[in-house]
Image: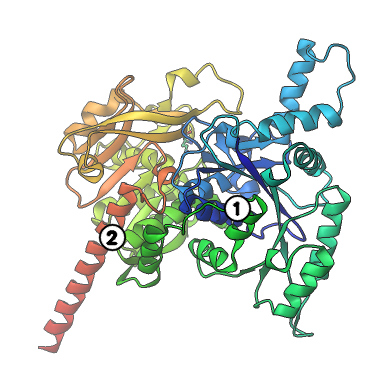
Amino acid sequence: MAKYIFVTGGVTSSLGKGIIAASLAKLLQARGFKVTIQKFDPYINVDPGTLNPYEHGECYVTEDGAETDLDLGHYERFLNIFTSQANNVTTGRIYQTVINKEREGAYLGKTVQVVPHITDEIKRRMQLLGQSDEYDIIITEIGGTVGDIESLPFVEAVRQLQWELPEEDSVIVHLTLIPYLKAAKELKTKPTQHSVKMLSQEGVHPDIIVCRTEKPLTPELRRKIAQFCNVKQEAVIEAADAPTIYEVPILMMREGLDKTVLKKMRITDYKEPELGKWKEFLDKLKYPNGKVTIGLIGKYLELQDAYKSILESFIHAGAMNECQVQVVNVHSEFITADNVSEKLSGLDGLLVAPGFGHRGVEGKIEAVKYARENNLPFFGICLGMQMAAIEFARNVLGLPEAHSTEMNPQTKEPVIDLMEEQKKITAKGGTMRLGAYPCELLPGSLAASIYNQTKISERHRHRWEFNNAYLDAFEKAGMIASGKNPGTGLVEIIELKDHPFFIGVQYHPELKSTVENPQPIFVHFVKAAKTFADKKQEAKKTTLQKEMI
Ligand code: GLN
């Protein structure tokens, strides 16, 4: 039977519960345990798929097509495993299940209540992944902050589970903040004491307290937290601000978080953590040999979390190339034909981001044109790929009215059109083309050389697609379909023949990049950007030399 670790948060949100949970999982995995993480979110949306990126950041899609919280991205990137729908549950999904059962008459005339019916459903889902013998340890992150009205049923479910499970089969880790008051020059423990008190009032007592802090915790402070929060001193873990999230597992190991957890679980038989690959990655990340500047052309740029997986993929790919990747945000709404070269001329590569709706698309199209005409390495993802197709149709094929029916339903040249299966769909939640689909690559293409194979599988999240009625004309003019779905013939990858690096993909490669397995298109894109930067440097040198003569 699996053992359970529950991670709760107190004092404020955004303390990095997901990173702490993923770091703990990484350490336990490195010690030889089979671990997975799941997230329980207290909001009422059935899943985050219908949320605007400004609300909740990126929507992360799993292999099985679940639209999930972006923390699942961290779990996959840290652990190098796949997660699934079972790894992310919201209040909405819990209630939906209970209400559906009530309508079926499954409660046999009983009054359906938060306790026990909602809490029972939460507990059932918390233990779902633990029922197979696939995992030794299941970590459950409870979204939100202790004391929120909406997280109460989840905390109550944890309380009950802790009571039901053998003592050594559950561990509660509580993450809090120890604020530093500049004026008093002091770290303050009171908010942590209050937060632990609140959790205890709800019936759950933490075994371990992880303290986010800007300054090191002194032994006296650790003692104070331990004493007033009623935990052992070794169970007070310092989580200092780290230069990169990938450093956190190492920091947690130094603090003994994993060992304290194992002790509570009465597990004594474990090996030293194998973190060779992880540390190698960290070294490359910390000591790069060069630098490239990539423009991220998007429209949700005010919120970093909106493009989380893309940014993390660049970190993995940069380390692989031993090169720092500086990502510069360029707001697509403000790119015009007049300013495009001024805005993009300093870049070594251009990524046009995924997105929905018409806002900012003309700027994206201008940016693609600039990359195509100036041999600037180009990478388009989902909407970015669709914009590349529209740009090519307008400016190379001579179809000025080319568009996507998403932005212009009446367009005379629908080079991007709604997928056939989507035409009957009206409901928005969970109805896109979602999850992993196979793709066959054209031998000899850039795509095939990047992946170094011809059969791949990647994850999707879209409704529109390349309109195959235009494929002939595109290919004759030099833009080829180098990846297609073997069953339906849907175009999944387009690339330009006469360009050093120009690729657009209908899927989301950023969802499968991990520390140990950086996504190959990102790796090759950064490499191409490096070549571009080197050439620029060379050209500069030659001009300088000429001037000196
Ligand atoms: N809006 C486009 C579609 O639905 C692209 C989606 C995306 O970029 N994820 O096809």
Relative to the observer, which residue lies in front, 124 or 56? 124
User: Could you tell me if residue 180 is visible in this image?
Assistant: no
- Tell me which numbered mark, 1 or 2, is placed earlier along the sequence: 1
Alpha-carbon neighbours of circle 1 within 10 Å: few (<14), some, or many (≥20)? many
For the point 73% across and 35% down, the residue is 91
Residue situated in front as seen by the camera: 182 or 266: 266
Which disc is residue 21 wearing? Answer: 1
The residue beneath circle 2 is: 529
Q: Residue at x 85, y 53 (%)?
A: 200
Which quadrant is home to the C terminus? bottom left
Q: Is residue 382 left or right of residue 302?
A: left
Looking at the picture, which amino acid does disc 1 mark?
A: Ala
Give whichever of 262, 443 is nearer the camera.
262
Place residue 160 in its image quadrant.
top right
Three-letter amino acid code at the position of disc 2: Ala
Instruction: Choose top left, top right, bottom left or bottom right for residue 470.
Output: top left
Q: Which quarter of the figure is the N terminus placed in?
A: top right
Q: Looking at mark 1, is its residue's CB closer than 8 Å to ligand 1?
A: no
Q: Residue at x 24, y 35 (%)?
A: 482
